[in-house]
Image (spheres, coloured by chain):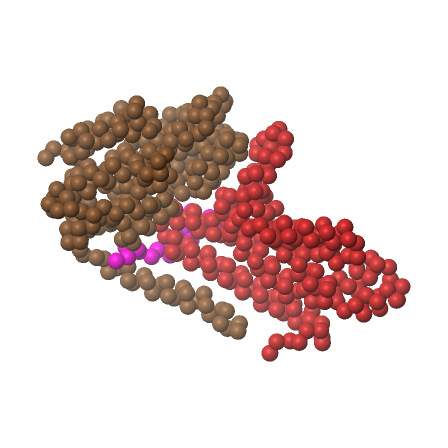
């Protein structure tokens, strides 16, 4: 009886160690070739990130990222000159990278910041969106900038690692001194509740997300977004690693959209005056798009 | 086609190794603190349920029904998200402003009060297992009601309830993983946290599982030993 109890963990560990060898067998076929053969593409989108991917009032799954995905499918159809079946798979910040890494989805378009650490697990397309981290506070709060966070409580999403690292850096460099206390929340919705209750003095994440949280509040005017960008957060499309054929195709599609105005029209649809969320394109973002408009 | 490179060094590499140890340590003191509450409160409630006083039995019964029949996760959310709002607003804000790691303390309260209901049932079953003759014998030697409980019935009942209490302790230890939902970085929470930085969730989850297995195994071995010593000869037939 006791022997068996002690044996189990070791069997489990040995089993998992045995997998280490299997991972070397990378798949040679490009995702692009497979799409041509099967006529199917599976793309992951967010469900709760206004307006990147979310459920609208009518219960339809829509968003800025989804429009980009649709453009990508159109480009695939033009290239192969046949109908491509577009499967939409829901993903969240916790599973988006594993879903691409294990091949469940061919691409993940979901407000994902490009980081070097993430590049180790998967690949990214060129950046298509640029935002930065700021603070959401109650209107009239004494907090105007990061220095004012000294000794205060700041909410962050536990999966938002780029945000956590940025804030930690500000603490380490004594920009926030004495340090603030980081309060982790499972998702931004719970964090927003914490801010409303007074559990945290400010909530810290990408401006695009904060603007979405504010817009969904019962009284959006009770909140304000303050502080300069602490870090820049360029978003990219998550792609399987070591598949340059597929990555080149996705990048070429993005560049074409940057150049022919499709991208700007899509941006205006979601972030313009008639859009879901008013977020004028910052100058840095404009420059980034111009730089990425590589010549033919 | 699994694109996954195993990297076990996330378990000890700086800064993740330190995080992981801290997470295990948090699991230990969180579940032990909750167990202290559970044991004291559970003993009291279990006793209430067997006292020859109707009011006490009602109070004890209500406590067990309420705390045992609501899912622990819901109770945890209640303590963390709702309970502070029941106080006057000033006190609520004072609480948020001056208590660090509110999630940690609320997790201890939630886990402690929930486990107390289960401990109470273990204690009650122990008390009910004490043969009536023991009470009569104690009273007949001139002991008062309190003395009877203190010197005869309770020690006897606790020895009977011991295996059940071991189980409840292990459940409490494992349930502490739920504290991650209110932002406490205990073992499971830390495993997920390191995963979100490194994308090596298989390794961290395996390590977390091994921590729970090893700790539970050690507790079971120790408790079995104590159980053998505490066993009341002739009361329960030992399993083969």
Q: Measured from the top left, where is residue B26 in percent x and y?
A: 54, 49
Is residue B164 found left or right of A241 in the rendered image? right
Residue B226, above or below A264 = below
Q: Measured from the top left, where is residue A141 in percent x and y?
A: 49, 23
**Foreground of the two, B235 or A252:** B235
Look at chain B in the picture and name its colour.
Answer: red
Residue A266, above or below B42 = above
Specify the quadrant that holds the C terminus of chain B.
Answer: bottom right
Which residues lie in the magenta part? B1-23
Residue B43 in view = no
Q: Residue at x 25, y 47 (%)?
A: A87
Question: Farthest residue toward the bottom?
Answer: B240
Q: Residue at x 24, y 37 (%)?
A: A68
Q: Residue at x 33, y 50 (%)?
A: A98
Q: Measured from the top left, where is residue B105 in percent x and y?
A: 59, 43
**Foreground of the two, A114 or B72:** B72
Queried whether the magenta region covers residue B11, the answer comes back as yes
């Amino acid at each position: 009886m006791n022997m068996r109890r002690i044996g189990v963990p070791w069997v489990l560990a040995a089993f998992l160690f045995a997998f280490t060898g299997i991972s070397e067998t990378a798949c040679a076929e490009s995702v692009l070739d497979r799409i041509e053969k099967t006529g199917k593409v599976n793309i992951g989108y967010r469900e709760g990130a206004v307006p990147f991917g979310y459920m609208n009032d009518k219960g339809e799954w829509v968003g800025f990222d989804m429009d980009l995905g649709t453009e990508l499918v159109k480009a695939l159809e033009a290239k192969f000159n046949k109908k491509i079946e577009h499967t939409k798979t829901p993903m969240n910040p916790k599973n988006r990278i594993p879903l691409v890494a294990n091949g469940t989805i061919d691409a993940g378009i979901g407000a994902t910041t490009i980081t070097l650490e993430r590049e180790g697990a998967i690949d990214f397309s060129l950046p298509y969106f640029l935002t930065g981290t700021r603070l959401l506070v109650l209107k009239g709060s004494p907090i105007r900038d990061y220095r004012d966070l000294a000794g205060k409580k700041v909410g962050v999403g536990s999966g938002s690692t780029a945000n956590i690292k940025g804030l930690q850096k500000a603490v380490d460099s004594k920009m926030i001194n004495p340090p603030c206390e980081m309060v982790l929340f499972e998702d931004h919705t719970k964090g927003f509740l914490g801010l409303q209750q007074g559990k945290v003095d400010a909530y810290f994440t990408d401006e695009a997300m904060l603007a979405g949280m504010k817009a969904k509040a019962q009284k959006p005017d009770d909140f304000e977004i303050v502080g300069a960008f602490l870090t820049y957060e360029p978003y990219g499309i998550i792609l399987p690693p070591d598949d340059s054929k597929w990555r080149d195709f996705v990048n070429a599609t993005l560049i074409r959209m940057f150049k022919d105005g499709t991208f700007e029209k899509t941006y205006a649809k979601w972030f313009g005056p008639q859009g879901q969320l008013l977020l004028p394109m910052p100058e840095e973002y404009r420059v980034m798009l111009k730089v990425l408009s590589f010549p033919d | 086609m699994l694109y996954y490179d195993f990297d076990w060094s996330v378990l000890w590499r700086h800064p993740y190794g330190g995080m992981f140890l801290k997470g295990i340590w948090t699991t230990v003191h969180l579940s032990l603190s909750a167990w202290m509450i559970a044991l004291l409160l559970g003993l009291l409630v279990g006793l209430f349920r067997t006292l020859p006083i109707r009011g006490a039995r009602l109070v004890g019964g209500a406590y067990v029904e309420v705390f045992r029949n609501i899912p622990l996760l819901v109770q945890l959310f209640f303590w963390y998200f709702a309970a502070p709002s029941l106080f006057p607003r000033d006190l609520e804000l004072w609480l948020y402003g001056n208590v660090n790691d509110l999630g940690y303390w609320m997790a201890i309260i939630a886990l402690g009060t929930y486990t107390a209901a289960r401990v109470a049932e273990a204690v009650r079953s122990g008390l009910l297992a004490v043969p009536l003759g023991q009470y009569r014998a104690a009273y007949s030697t001139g002991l008062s009601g309190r003395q009877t409980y203190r010197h005869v019935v309770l020690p006897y009942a606790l020895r009977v309830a011991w295996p059940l209490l071991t189980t409840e302790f292990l459940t409490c230890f494992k349930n502490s993983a739920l504290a991650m939902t209110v932002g406490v970085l205990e073992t499971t929470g830390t495993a997920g946290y390191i995963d979100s930085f490194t994308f090596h969730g298989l390794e961290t989850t395996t390590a977390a599982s091994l921590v729970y297995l090893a700790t539970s195994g050690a507790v079971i071995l120790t408790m079995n030993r104590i159980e053998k010593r505490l066993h009341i000869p002739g009361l329960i037939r030992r399993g083969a």
